[in-house]
Every structure is written in structure tokens, then in C-alpha cells.
Amino acid sequence: MPPNPARLVAEHLSRSFAGRKVVDDISLSVAPGQVTCLLGPSGCGKSTTLRIIAGVERADTGRVRIDGQEMAGPGLHLPPEKRSVGLMFQDFALFPHLTVAENVAFGLRMDRAQRQARVDELLERVNLIGFGAKHPHQLSGGEQQRVALARALAPRPRVMLMDEPFSGLDNRLRDGIRDTTLDILKEEGTAVVLVTHEPDEAMRMADEIVLMRAGRMVQKGAPYNVYNTPVDKAAAAFFSDINVIRGISRGALTQTPFGAFLTPGHADGAAVDIVIRPQHLKIDFDRGGRGPNPTPQDGTPARGTVQRARYLGRESLVEFRMDFDGSVLTASVPGVFLPKPGAVLWLMIRRDRCFVFPAR
């Protein structure tokens, strides 16, 4: 089957405030049922991009099309109510004086019987049957979020724009609400653009991640690809803690505590950063690192002294000072592993999970 045509297309969006470019040449294409996540730190332009797509903000340059119809472009700017977009925000924005049913029905342009049928259908889908007569203050945070979802879906928007809608929920509720929301949006065939600064949320929800920094797209792709092939050291660090081994490339080789690394493409004498995540730094428990034949991707074992160890519930983090150069590296170990400071252990590194970048 051919892929779904794009429901939402944004091309070369830019926006400046007081001479500072907040959104700089952002382009997106989102198919029906697809979730694209704008991910990045606060102030990187995520929410402004969302507001431009919604029609709340005017772009300085660029175009927005929904199902092929131009919503914004040179000389054109349709207001939000003309764009068939749904909006969900962190604060839910429910009307406190209206009941749950009245909140969901707000803005529906149909006769009373059709309106009631649509409200009943949505309250059932978000597991709020029997809540129609209640007011928002009588609901929990998770229930309020589900009402906000039902209200946003009621007019059957072609595009749903979500600006950190789950950040106000506690961790116990968040995963369940996110999964329910995602299931309903995909069933409805809604194109979704989600803004978040939380990498875990992006990895959990998105079909495509757009990593943003200083108003620009740094990297775009499926979560697996963005996580496992970061474009630079900052992109790798945004998704998890990292270890950085600094070295000098000489003859396309860089010496490290774990032996020589191939660093082709770097000038002779150039400083490079070899980046590895803590979960890929392995403690060799077999005879102090001189155990049975490390595989080629594990490289040469290196000795380090424990500085401190912390238990975080699912894993333990152990910091080592390396004999080779005095650098400090952190290893993540599943479960409980709390060696005492001063203990000497041997480490191995997953070479196939390392990234090499120019040092900055």
C-alpha cells in the first residue's frame, strides 16, 4: 500500500521577535495517525512553531498546508478556527462553570441530538461514562486531562497540536493517560504535533522526533535513529547521561584508556570526543578484567578506581577514576551494585556503541 499523503505540511517557517530569530527554517510533514514530536530545551522555539501551525502566531516566512489547503503563506493567514486544528495544553483550560458534558460539547455546531451523541461517544472512549454532570473541580488531574482530550477531539480536527499536555500529571497517571490519548488519536487518524522537553516522552509517543536547538532543527528521524545515531555530542547528551573520552587523533587513531580508536576523517592532531552512554560501559567481573577473551567490540579492558556508587532503584551508577589519564567515567549497572570507594575494578567499552565527534 502507498504511504498516507501528508495531512499537515509546514515549509520553511521562520519567526523573529525583537530582532532575534526564535524559529529558523522549520519544515515538517505529518501523515494521518502520525505523531511528530518537537523536542528540545526551553526557549528553543518549539511552542512558537506550534503556535504558527495553529494560526495563533504569524510566521515571518513559510507556509502551512492542511490536507493540501493553504492555511498560511505570503499574504494569507487563516485564524485557528478555520484550520480544523485541536489544541491541548498543560493547564487543560476547562471552563469551571460548565459541566464535563458541556465542556466537551463546547463549540460543536450541530443539532442537540447529534451533539449529545458525540459527547456520549467521547466520554465512553476516555472512560468517563457517568461523569457528564460533574464540574471540573470535582475531578482528579487525570480525569480533567481526559475531558480536555475529549473536548479537543469533539469537532474531529484533522490536526492535533499538543504543548506539554501531560507535564502537570504525576508519574503514576502520566503513562496511562499518554497511552490512552495516543490510541484515540491514532484511531481517529489525526495528525499530531507534540511539544515536549522530555526525551522519555518523545521516545514513548513519537513516530518521528524533531530535535530543536536555538530555533533550528538539529536532527529529524524515527526515535531509534535519533537516539542511536546522534548528529553531535549535544544531541547524544540530550537523551541520556554520557561519558566523554577526550583524545587527539593521530594517523586516524586516538589513544584512550581502552586502547586505540579509529577516528578517520579527523585531521592529524585534532582533538576528538569519544562519547559512550553509561549503560554501554561494562564492568568486567571475571578475574579483574583478565577474564575469557573480550570480544573485539569490547576493546581493551582498563582499570579504574571507584569514586562513589549510587542506587537509583532500577540501576546503580558507579563512578570510576581511570588509571590511564585520571578521567572520570560512569557505568550503569542493572539492580543493586554498590562497591565501596577505593575499590579497583576493570572496565570494558562497547566500541560499536561509541560516537566520535570533533571536540568543541
Image (cartoon, helix red, strand yellow):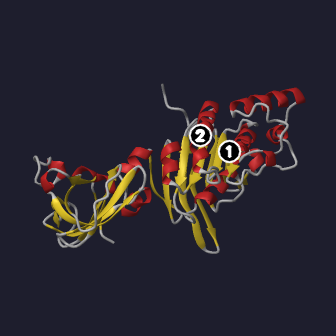
| Residue 228 in the figure: left or right of residue 354 | right
Residue at left 70%, top 39%?
Answer: 157
Indicate which disc, 1 or 2, sits on the residue closer to the N terminus.
Answer: 1
Question: Which kind of residue does numbered mark 1 sit on?
Answer: Gly
323 displayed left or right of 88: left
Tell me whether circle 1 and circle 2 mark residues in contact (CB < 8 Å): yes
The kind of residue tagged 2 is Gly
Q: Position of residue 337 (x, y in %)?
A: 31, 54
Q: Is residue 349 visible?
A: no
Q: Residues within 10 Å of mark 1 (few under 14, many from 20)?
A: some
In this picture, is 305 found above or below 64? Answer: below
Give the percent coordinates (x, y) of residue 257.
18, 64
Q: Nearer the viewer, residue 313 or 176?
A: 313
Image location (x, y in percent) of residue 79: 76, 51
Residue 145 visible in the shown view: yes
Residue lying at 16% horizontally and 63% vertically, measured from the top left: 252
Q: Which residue is mark 1?
A: 142
Helix, strand, or loop for circle 1?
helix
Q: Residues within 10 Å of mark 2 (few under 14, many from 20)?
A: few
Q: What residue is pinned by disc 2?
A: 176
